[in-house]
Image (cartoon, coloured by chain):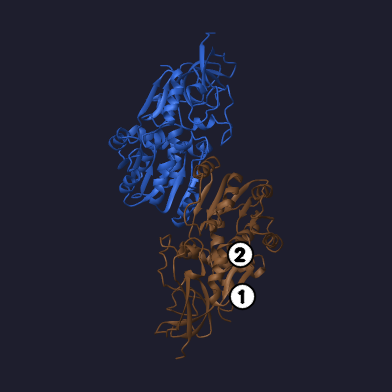
Chain colours: A blue, B brown
Amino acid sequence: MTQYANRSIVLAARPQGAPTPQDFRLQQGTAPEPAEGQVLLRTLYLSLDPYMRGRMNEGAAYAPPLALGSVMVGGTVSRVVASRHPRFREGELVLGASGWQDYALSDGADLTPLGDIARPSYALSVLGMPGFAAYHGLLHIGQPRAGETVVVGAASGAVGAVVGQIARIKGARVVGIAGGADKCAYVVDELGFDACVDRNDPRFAALLAAACPDGIDVYFENVGGAVFDAVLPLLNDNARVPVCGFIAHYNERELPPGPNRVPLLMATLLNKRVRMQGFIILDHYADGYAAFQRDMGAWVAEGSVKLREDLTDGLEHAPRALIGLLEGRNFGKVVVRVAE
Amino acid sequence: MTQYANRSIVLAARPQGAPTPQDFRLQQGTAPEPAEGQVLLRTLYLSLDPYMRGRMNEGAAYAPPLALGSVMVGGTVSRVVASRHPRFREGELVLGASGWQDYALSDGADLTPLGDIARPSYALSVLGMPGFAAYHGLLHIGQPRAGETVVVGAASGAVGAVVGQIARIKGARVVGIAGGADKCAYVVDELGFDACVDRNDPRFAALLAAACPDGIDVYFENVGGAVFDAVLPLLNDNARVPVCGFIAHYNERELPPGPNRVPLLMATLLNKRVRMQGFIILDHYADGYAAFQRDMGAWVAEGSVKLREDLTDGLEHAPRALIGLLEGRNFGKVVVRVAE
């Protein structure tokens, strides 16, 4: 069989605070050969997502931590380059989880054939895990009704952009929060949000309040920090807060300084009868993925949901791209183009 | 008509931190006479409850603040002493909201006839607002299943005691938290909880963990503070946290010192897929009170739900009793016996 050079990026050290390039290591190797029932995959696109920061830590969260020296995990779009599996043929595109490497083996159980998908990288965003997280969290926990106000942070990012576009489809008034005037302009002009507030503006809290004259009925939490603090006093009675993530805290080595705002959060939950609920999208594939695929496929086809991608060329630049994502320096869904 | 001397206790000053006797003022007056369609009520029992502390503050929470000089609010069991209302006859007992005074007028809209109730003061606790809060919060938000672990704070208090007894009826394993060995003994020996942990014990967090070997599936939040901090790491996947109150914080003048534990709470909600939901029981009378009355009436009649009362004799001692309640010095439901 053909021998392929295989590069992989492994976790070299556990980050102390923000990851640095030294926390990653590029390894050179040779792609393995598929056994009977396996396929060899060539990575075309690698998805970079905020959850990856948590997997680099020592303590287990909802998934066990990544061992030092392991290949960084991640969703991928790949081409089957060799198949000894009856369901997959050479040349076809699949969605999988090869992680940060050029080649990987699979027994097919974790692969989804992509068929003639118009834009394969969308399988990592709008049509994939981030899109499903946005769809499930907004519709099943947030439950926006027409005319309500929905607020979402990281509004030009993979999850936030989709949350806002679905909320618009459902008839809500949608206010985004994003870091910078260019992102805010994109969110309003291209994605059709009703408003977007720049979280870097020193008047941020006042601007958010002004953008939500009727308060906030659904806050899709994927940011935390100062954004959450500004949202809290604006929540309406019976507001819903799906908790999908909180990127503002992922690089923190310890809890931020006081005061302890938990009593204020509790008082708000009580006085406003707020429901706040965390979810991990991996739990919901069995029950909810089919409905998501059907709805989102239609919305993407008709052009009512779209997403800007922030493409980085070359696997070797994946660490830098993840570091930038965690600092909010990306503009759109972060995807590494590993091969054509 | 007979003229009745009427004492009332008004809000004299807004408490700075814990209320003091100087924040209340006893006023002497004369009971008003009922007009056509009104009744004059003689207060027999006055309920004291933690929510009253919030009503003494300036800022509005779920209800407008009490004006300075106003009679302190509160649920009451009263006898009708004069009636010009077709639905009420002199001598009958009613549940109402006369507040902290000997006599009050009512047009009947806020009154519930108590009929031949065996223990009238129970209309202020097990069979009234605290019992309904326990019932609604536990069953509609907490949704305990048989075999799950339910934890509740202030377990010898009006709400906590009822939460635990209902959870036992539903087949859950119930762990109470209370302040002191005597309260813990009562909670286990008299109320039938499976265990109770003394929150004043220096090993509290470790003892709670030991009492919950299978983690916590439902935490009924009515305490906050160090109790909530100890509960947080024990929550299981898909735990539910009804938020009914947080007496530990009611007397705080400002947020407690850091670190800010909100990111830890967020991480727990996310990683454990926790649902946390505040509720105000006043919202649920129209939809849920009938079912509560039916179920709780049966449980009390058969002896499967009961409650110790902490009786104070004399309206003039109500301020001291409320101050003690907010410091956890009561043992059972706090009721002021205003008249026989």
Across and down, in percent, residue B199 comes to 64, 54
Residue type, numbered disc 1: Arg
Find the distance from the CA under tag 1 to the CA under tag 2. Answer: 24 Å
Residue A2 vs B34, above or below: the answer is above
For this rendering, which residue is in front, B52 or A172?
Answer: B52
Quadrant in the rendering for residue A316 = top left
Residue A195 vs A311, above or below: the answer is below
**Chain at numbered mark 2:** B
Disc ID at residue B119: 1
The answer to whether residue A35 shows anywhere in this view is yes
Going by the image, does A175 lie left or right of B145?
left
For this rendering, which residue is in front, A236 or B178?
Answer: B178
Q: Who comes first in sequence, dot 1 or dot 2?
A: 1
Across and down, in percent, residue B55 comes to 45, 65
**Chain at numbered mark 1:** B
Label 2 environment density (alpha carbons within 10 Å; few <14, some 14–19, many ≥20) = few
Q: Indicate the quadrant containing the C terminus of chain B: top left, top right, bottom left or bottom right.
A: bottom right
Going by the image, does A156 lie left or right of B134?
left
The answer to whether residue B292 shows anywhere in this view is no
Across and down, in percent, residue B171 comes to 66, 55
Q: Secondary structure at mark 2?
A: loop
Residue type, numbered disc 2: Arg
Going by the image, does A214 lie left or right of A245?
left
Going by the image, does A242 lie left or right of A184?
right
Residue on which disc 2 sits: B329
Q: Indicate the quadrant containing the N terminus of chain B: top left, top right, bottom left or bottom right.
A: bottom left
